[in-house]
Image (cartoon, helix red, strand yellow):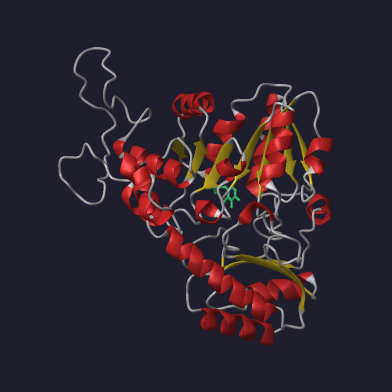
């Protein structure tokens, strides 16, 4: 990236950073470079590309854009969000301890509990809305805090700045899963986090057509360790998928504005529905909003005053909102966490964390807000 671009606004960098300067075609978008290997000038030459697991031009264009958008110095793209997380956890050693927020993506908890525990790593979970919860859970072995904000699926906000200062006071690292907010709404590295994690399968790519993950950092030592884990473990993102994420990023700012606008309209409607027991939406509980999120984002959760079967019926009664896992695409999705995204979490643990059988999570897309509200209205009418 040239120096002039560095000082430009987010929207401009999203569109202009990811070009491939060494490409002689002068294309205004980068090419997809499938070559696994590259001509070297002499045995041992590492002056250019060598082998695509190590570096690839299309992936590099994406990684430079991702680093720029999160205000980091380096980014690494992986074959999924969970593969990116794996590269972070691979920095730990047996005996070490991780503290995570309890309201957490189901697959994150599954990897912690069913993969990493087998390698001798220990985990504790805390509510975290009061940052002191993290401090109380520290042990002499704690090496990492892993958090989301907003959390999934209850959309709680956790104060990244406060958690970062607690982590650093005790010599631990803070990794923030920024999938729900995206760097357009919140930049954890600016708030003191050491590592930003993304499932790029969601808002970053934005069209439900690619599975991808990413890590961003601004510390040289951490960058070296994560780059090592990327090429030593080998779960990096392929060139075609890199290109898809890069294309998605160019409209991230427009999409996040519309997702947020539509989500606010949906919340306004839900507030008027007698069958709705409680709405979960960033900033909704009336408390001052930490982290200075620019807009609330496109995720809305709510509890129905209804039994499991009725909630299931509601989840299949919408027509525009597609009943499906995942989130963050242009199309609206509806999810029943207890039966879908969070079904892998034991029922007692899930319920203790507030993810009840009557919870519905919406990923509000960028269709017309009036059509989305009308769809929800007819679904409530069908109960
Ligand atoms: C989807 C998701 C993940 C996992 O990412 P994959 O790309 O599906 O591997 C992690 N964290 C959050 C918050 C997610 O929504």
Total of numbered circles in the picture?
0
142 or 347: nearer the eye? 142
Q: At which x and y percent is residue 63?
A: 40, 40
Q: 125 above or below 284? A: above
Indicate the quadrant where residue 326 lies. Answer: bottom right
For the C terminus, which image quadrant?
Answer: bottom right
**Side of 268 relative to 234 (left or right):** right
303 or 336: nearer the eye? 303
Indicate the quadrant where residue 275 lies. Answer: bottom right
Q: At which x and y percent is residue 201?
A: 49, 52
Can residue 67 be spotted in the picture? yes
**Side of 58 relative to 112 (left or right):** left
| Residue located 57% across and 65% down the image | 298
**Side of 264 relative to 36 (left or right):** right
Can residue 322 be spotted in the picture? no
Residue that sits furthest to the top in the current view: 43
| Residue located 81% across and 42% down the image | 132
Indicate the quadrant where residue 336 lies. Answer: bottom right
Q: 41 above or below 114? A: above
Q: At which x and y percent is residue 329?
A: 48, 62
353 or 12: nearer the eye? 12
For the N terminus, which image quadrant?
Answer: top left
Q: At which x and y percent is residue 178?
A: 58, 48
**Side of 353 relative to 215 (left or right):** right
């Amino acid at each position: 990236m040239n120096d002039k671009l560095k000082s430009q606004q987010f929207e401009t960098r999203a569109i202009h950073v990811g070009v491939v300067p060494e490409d002689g075609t002068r294309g205004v978008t980068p090419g997809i470079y499938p070559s696994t290997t590259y001509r070297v000038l002499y045995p041992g030459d590492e002056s250019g590309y060598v082998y695509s697991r190590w570096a690839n031009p299309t992936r590099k264009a994406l990684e430079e854009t991702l680093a720029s958008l999160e205000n980091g110095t380096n980014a690494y793209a992986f074959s999924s969000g969970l593969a990116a997380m794996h590269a972070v956890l691979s920095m730990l050693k047996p005996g070490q301890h991780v503290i995570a927020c309890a309201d957490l993506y189901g697959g994150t908890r599954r990897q912690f509990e069913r993969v990493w525990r087998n390698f001798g790593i220990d985990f504790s979970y805390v509510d975290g809305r009061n940052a002191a919860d993290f401090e109380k859970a520290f042990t002499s072995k704690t090496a990492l805090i892993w958090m989301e904000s907003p959390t999934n699926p209850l959309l709680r906000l956790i104060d990244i700045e406060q958690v970062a200062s607690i982590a650093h006071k005790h010599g631990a690292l803070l990794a923030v899963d920024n999938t729900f907010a995206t760097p357009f709404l919140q930049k954890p590295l600016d708030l003191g986090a050491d590592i930003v994690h993304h499932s790029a399968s969601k808002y970053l790519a934005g069209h439900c057509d690619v599975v991808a993950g990413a890590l961003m950092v601004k510390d040289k030592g951490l960058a070296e360790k994560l780059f090592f884990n990327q090429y030593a473990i080998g779960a990096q993102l392929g060139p075609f998928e890199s290109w898809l994420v890069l294309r998605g990023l160019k409209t991230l700012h427009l999409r996040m504005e519309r997702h947020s606008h539509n989500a606010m309209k949906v919340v306004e409607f839900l507030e008027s529905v007698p069958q709705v027991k409680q709405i979960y939406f960033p900033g909704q509980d009336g408390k001052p909003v930490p982290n200075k999120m620019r807009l609330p984002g496109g995720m809305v959760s709510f509890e129905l005053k209804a039994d499991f079967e009725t909630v299931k019926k509601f989840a299949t009664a919408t027509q525009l909102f597609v009943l499906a896992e995942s989130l963050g695409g242009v199309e609206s999705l509806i999810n029943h966490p207890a039966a879908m995204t969070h079904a892998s979490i034991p029922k007692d643990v899930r319920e203790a964390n507030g993810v009840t059988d009557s919870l519905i999570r919406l990923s509000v897309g960028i269709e017309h807000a009036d059509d989305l509200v009308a769809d929800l209205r007819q679904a409530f009418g069908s109960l």
